[in-house]
Each structure stands twice: as structure tokens, then as C-alpha cells.
Image (cartoon, helix red, strand yellow):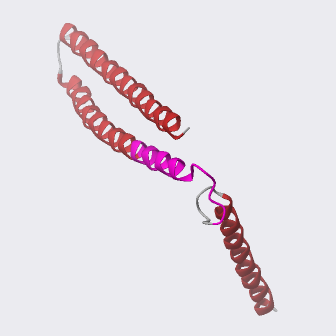
């Protein structure tokens, strides 16, 4: 009894995979430039724009990765400094060090957000440039 159920589920899964593969093949043939018979005029320009956009996205992702690593390292340093606050005995020194830690932490957050916005603006600029050249 269970063998029939498993066999039916296996067949259904195989048919589902075949259907998805066929669907993707059909979708790909609808994209400009993927089929030599259906290549519209300007397909080469579109492919060049897509390549340029891919390079821009790759560059942006690498930049974001570097920025995240930098922020993570700075965050670890901030956490270490926060743990050192427990060693302070004087209340005025504790207040000053806490304020300094708070200012550095929010400075790091501000720097992170500014970097994200600047990188995003640069990526959108490159995308717009690639699209205007393709047009």
C-alpha cells in the first residue's frame, strides 16, 4: 500500500520537475537575444547593457561585503569597549566613557547608512547610464 503511494509521489515529483524545466525553456526563448531566430534589432546593445549592469551589481556587492566586514570589526571593538565599562570605578569617568562609546556607536551607524546610500546611488547611476546607452 505504501509502495503505491511512494511510487505515485515519485511520479508526481518527476512530472513536476519536467514541467518546470519545459516552462523555463519556453520562457528563455521569449527573452530577446536568446533565440537566433527571434533576435530583435538592438539585441546586442541590450546584451551589452545587461553585461554592464551585471558588472555594476557585482562591484556593488563586493563593496557592500567590504563595508559589512569593516562595520562588523568596528562593532566588535565597540562591544569590547562596552565590556570594559564595568571596570570603571569613578562615576564621572563611567559617564564620560559611556557617552564616548554611544557617540562612536552612532557615528558608525551613520557611516554605515551613508555608505549604503552612496553605493546605491552609484549603482542606480550606472544602471541609468547602461540603459540610456542601450536605448
Quarter of the figure with the C terminus: top right
Q: How many discs appear? A: 0
Q: Main secondary structure of the magenta part?
A: helix
Q: Which residue lies furthest to the top in this view?
A: 92
Residue 93 picture quarter: top left
Residue at 34%, 44% in the rendered image: 62
What is the x, y in percent for residue 49? 48, 45
What is the x, y in percent for residue 63? 33, 39
- Left or right: where 91 falls relative to 13: left
Residue 18 picture quarter: bottom right
What is the x, y in percent for residue 132? 52, 34
- Note whether 36 is above or below 106 in the view shown: below
Viewer-closest of 72 and 34: 34
- Say if the magenta span includes residue 48: yes
Q: Residue furthest front?
A: 41
Residue at 59%, 62% in the rendered image: 34
- Left or right: where 17 falls relative to 94: right
Point out the stretch of residues depicted in magenta: 37-57
Residue 16 picture quarter: bottom right
Viewer-closest of 61 and 97: 61
Quarter of the figure with the N terminus: bottom right
Viewer-closest of 86 and 129: 129
Viewer-closest of 65 and 92: 65
- Note whether 61 is above or below 88 in the view shown: below
- Say if the magenta span includes residue 111: no
What is the x, y in percent for residue 102? 31, 17
Amino acid at each position: 500500500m505504501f509502495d503505491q503511494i511512494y511510487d505515485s509521489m515519485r511520479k508526481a515529483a518527476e512530472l513536476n520537475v519536467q514541467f518546470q524545466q519545459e516552462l523555463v525553456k519556453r520562457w528563455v526563448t521569449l527573452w530577446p537575444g536568446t533565440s537566433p531566430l527571434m533576435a530583435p534589432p538592438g539585441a546586442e546593445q541590450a546584451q551589452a547593457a545587461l553585461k554592464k549592469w551585471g558588472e555594476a551589481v557585482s562591484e556593488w556587492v563586493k563593496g557592500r561585503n567590504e563595508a559589512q566586514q569593516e562595520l562588523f570589526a568596528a562593532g566588535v571593538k565597540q562591544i569590547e569597549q562596552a565590556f570594559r565599562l564595568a571596570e570603571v570605578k569613578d562615576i564621572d569617568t563611567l559617564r564620560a566613557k559611556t557617552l564616548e562609546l554611544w557617540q562612536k556607536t552612532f557615528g558608525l551607524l551613520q557611516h554605515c547608512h551613508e555608505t549604503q546610500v552612496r553605493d546605491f546611488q552609484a549603482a542606480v547611476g550606472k544602471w541609468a547610464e547602461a540603459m540610456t546607452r542601450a536605448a
